[in-house]
Amino acid sequence: MPDAGDLPVLKAIALLGGCRGPVRVSTQSLSTTLGTSPQTISRRLKALESAHLINRMIDPSGQSVTVTKGGEEVLRREHAEYCRIFSRTGGHFILSGMVISGLGEGRYYMSLDHYKTQFRINCGFEPFPGTLNLRLNQQSIPV
């Protein structure tokens, strides 16, 4: 996980298109965008590169920066956290995926009288004789 101050730099690079491919950036332009010094941006870029969250290519005319898969994952986790903060679903989750077949073991256990009795006592209903197996889409899996 990057330092809290590194995240805005990673986000700025992504907003410039760094998740799709290399983008040309300068410490001066990023410092203006983020309201900090070029020296701070330089330190942040080195930290992001050391953490393998970005790749940098430096040449005589400047530098190109690309967000790595690891960097994208950090941004996705941040996005998921903001979605939970600002979600209007009142703490509920919306899962999307595909129903798949299981091993059939759920049917066995849910048919045993002991299990059915415990469900009736503790949950107030008799369980369905099986389980619902879902293969969740990546967006539904919290990180």
Image: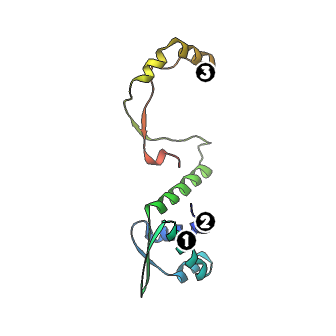
**Label 1: element kind:** helix
Image point (61%, 65%), residue name? 3
Q: Which mark is residue 133?
A: none
> Considering only order in the chain, which callout, 2 or 3, is on the residue closer to the N terminus?
2
Q: Are marks 3 and 2 in contact (CB under 8 Å)?
A: no
Q: Position of residue 110 (x, y in %)?
A: 48, 18
Quickly name the residue at label 3.
Answer: 123
How many numbered discs, if any?
A: 3
* Mark 3 or mark 2, whichever is nearer to me: 2
Quickly name the residue at label 2.
Answer: 3
Q: Which corner quadrant of the image does residue 7 belong to?
A: bottom right
Q: Which corner quadrant of the image does residue 97 belong to?
A: top left
Q: Where 34 sits versus 1, above or below?
A: below
* Mark 1 or mark 3, whichever is nearer to me: 1
The reply to whether residue 21 is in sight is yes
Looking at numbered disc 2 in the image, what kind of residue is underneath it?
Answer: Asp
Looking at numbered disc 3 in the image, what kind of residue is underneath it?
Answer: Cys
Q: Where 134 sits versus 2, above or below?
A: above
The reply to whether residue 33 is in sight is no
Quickly name the residue at label 1.
Answer: 47
Front-most of 88 and 117? 117
Q: Residue furthest bottom?
A: 60
Rendered-image quadrant of the N terminus: bottom right
Front-most of 20 and 5? 5
> Considering only order in the chain, which callout, 3 or 1, is on the residue closer to the N terminus?
1
Query: What colour scheme does the image use?
Result: rainbow
Image point (48%, 57%), residue name? 73
> Considering only order in the chain, which callout, 2 or 1, is on the residue closer to the N terminus?
2
Q: Are marks 1 and 2 in contact (CB under 8 Å)?
A: yes
Q: Position of residue 98 (x, y in %)?
A: 39, 37
**How many residues crowd around disc 2 within 10 Å: few (fewer than 14), some, or many (20 or more)?**
few
Mark 1 and mark 3: Cα distance apart in space = 51 Å
